[in-house]
Image (spheres, rainbow, N blue to C red):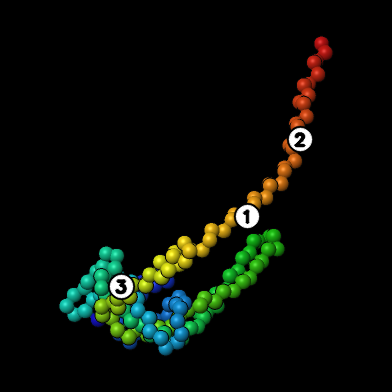
Amino acid sequence: MFAVIKTGGKQYKVSKDDIIKVEKLEGEAGTKVTLDTVLIIGDEKGVEVGSPFVAGKSVTLEILEHSRSAKIIIFKKKRRHNYRRTAGHRQHQTVLKVVSIGKEAAKKAAPKAKAAPKAEAAKTEAPKKAAPKKAAPKKAAPKKAAAKKTPAAKKS
């Protein structure tokens, strides 16, 4: 069985027990991450393609470690101008191991509404008086443009 998942703006074809390196994900090493952005799931029976994602399917991955990729050297040069700049960059990445593919996505519990008690507390408090507005600083008057001089009349 295989799946094509999307994470970090890229797509990866994975199967069970594969190890992949993706852009950094939140979480500690050893924790499990569930990605429900599954584009394609396939097995011996056939292939199921999502539009854009396969509904109700997910891929469970285990975070092995966080690391950084190999250094990329950036070199800029403009010939005959003595302009040379060198810089380097190492991208943060997460190493993942595929634990399972195709199981139903775990349904997240709906967040409990705690906004209502705050609204009630706001009603019971006395309304605060607005602070007096400060006068805006006066701007200097714009200088008048000097009168345009007309060219002198030509003598004949």
Marks 2 and 3, Cα distance to the nearest angstrom? 66 Å
Residue 35 picture location, percent across and down: 35, 76
Tell me which amino acid carries mark 3.
Val
Marks 2 and 1, Cα distance to the nearest angstrom? 35 Å
Residue in view at x 59 percent, y 54 percent: 130
Tell me which amino acid carries mark 1.
Ala
The image quadrant that residue 100 belongs to is bottom left
Nearer mark to the viewer, of 3 and 1 = 1
As helix, strand or loop, the secondary structure at mark 2 comes to loop
Rendered view: 14 above or below 119: below
N-term-proximal mark, 2 vs 1: 1
Q: How many marks?
A: 3
Residue occupying the far top of the picture: 156
The image quadrant that residue 88 belongs to is bottom right
Residue ID for mark 3? 38
Residue 71 picture location, percent across and down: 55, 78
Residue in view at x 52 percent, y 76 percent: 91
Horizontal side, residue 77 vs residue 15: left or right: right
